[in-house]
Image: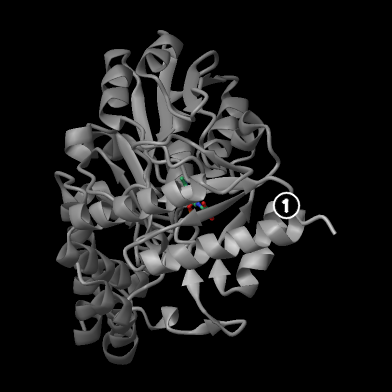
Amino acid sequence: MDINTIRKDFPILNQKVHGNPLIYLDTSATSQSPVQVVDAMSEYYNEYNSNVHRGVHTLGTKATDGYEQARMKVRGFINALRYEEIVFTRGTTAAINLVARSFGEANISEGDEIVVTEMEHHANIVPWQELAKRKNAKLVFIPLEEDGTIKLENVEAVMTDKTKIVAVTHVSNVLGTINDIKSIAEIAHRHDAYITVDGAQSVPHMSVDVQDLDVDFYAFSGHKMLGPTGIGVLYGKAELLDKMEPIEYGGDMIDFVDLRESTWTDLPVKFEAGTPMIAEAIGLSAAIDYINDIGADEILRYEQELVKYAYDKMSEIEGIEIYGPKEERAGLITFNLDGVHPHDLATALDSDGIAVRAGHHCAQPLMKFLGVSSTARASFYLYNTKDEIDFFIDSLKRTKEFFTHEF
Ligand code: 7TS
């Protein structure tokens, strides 16, 4: 991995913020896109912008090819068995809502249990809460260890003969915990339950093989993996998707429409009513090419090097609290500095050109578990450097000194 070459692909990084070089440490919220992604999308708009699955004209055919090839690209990227198992959605949130509204609606009855964790992003809690309310079902939480990890024996312990769905994140966007999805899937299936996984923070940073993990559903977003906003993916096993009802109706998803009755077309378009995100799918495809060219394993290795470097240096700062596991963590660090509110900290860092996120990170139940109302978070990707981390650490120390200095 040649970091200088990589950084040239991200012109957005080459700018000053408040007079300082931008240091972008907020990839967990949204990653930056390389020129290859932006070029692929502008090529679509400049050369073959057209609707898909409709016309026979040349542009329409080319747009359809681009859109469907993007689906094939995603299939290979997560090693799904069939391209029909790849449904394009607006993002992770929309994908999880689709599972809850469609699969959940049909498979959850009164008294059933849906297992989640306290480390979930709101996107993987609220749809299940609402489903549970509609159905008089129960949400059950896998308890977290103090360091924010999950013990498999605790997964086993919450499973009952009423458990129908286990909904869990692969990587926590706050703690950086990497959950053992393969083992959790095995436990779920042994109890005749289904597993749906929030992959928003995993797919961008490590190679994911949905067949090897043996998950039933897996959701992720384009904008966290170098791609554009407005597109994400729901992977689902074909035999499950096949039986599911759409949650949106209209053009493209129908087979035959009569005045009072209609039938649906085949997977996966059955779940993609209306004009889909064509440019975005093409951009996502270019993002996958970019990741594949470098290699997901190489990206993970580099990020692990960065996060370890940052963790060791941050740990030396007096009065810092870092949340989540010390070892085996993804490329993000959530923390608080004694005496400095996270929002003040993020504002001070911004004046040094450093972008971090502050707040509850859409994980309010987790904040409660940690006993805080908000935290700051630095997250890393393939375009960050150790020099940037040095500057960030230096800025953290200066900020702490400023806020806690006794005059
Ligand atoms: N799940 C996880 C684990 C996430 O981190 C996020 C976004 C989502 C779901 C929702 O993804 P979306 O693309 O549908 O919005 N996480 C964050 C974050 O950590 N900071 O801003 C967004």
Which residue does the image show at 44% across and 62% down from the upper left? 389
User: In this image, 230 relative to 372: left or right?
Assistant: left
Type of amino acid at the residue the image marks with label 1? His
User: In this image, 89 relative to 364: left or right?
Assistant: left
x and y percentages locating residue 352 in the rendered image: 60, 73
From this viewpoint, which residue is outermost toward the front? 407
Q: As rendered, which of 341 and 271 lies closer to the eye? A: 341
Which residue does the image show at 19% across and 67% down from the upper left? 1
x and y percentages locating residue 213 in the rendered image: 22, 34
x and y percentages locating residue 2 in the rendered image: 21, 72
- Split into 4 quadrants, where in the image is the C terminus? bottom right
Q: As rendered, which of 247 and 44 lies closer to the eye? A: 44
Which residue does the image show at 20% across and 78% down from the upper left? 61
Q: As rendered, which of 175 and 73 lies closer to the eye? A: 175
Q: Secondary structure at mark 1?
A: loop
Q: As rendered, which of 269 and 39 lies closer to the eye? A: 39
Find disc 1 in the rendering and name its residue: 341
Asked whether residue 295 appears in the rendered view, the answer is yes
Q: Quadrant of residue 397?
A: bottom right
- Where 11 falls versus 379 (above or below)? below
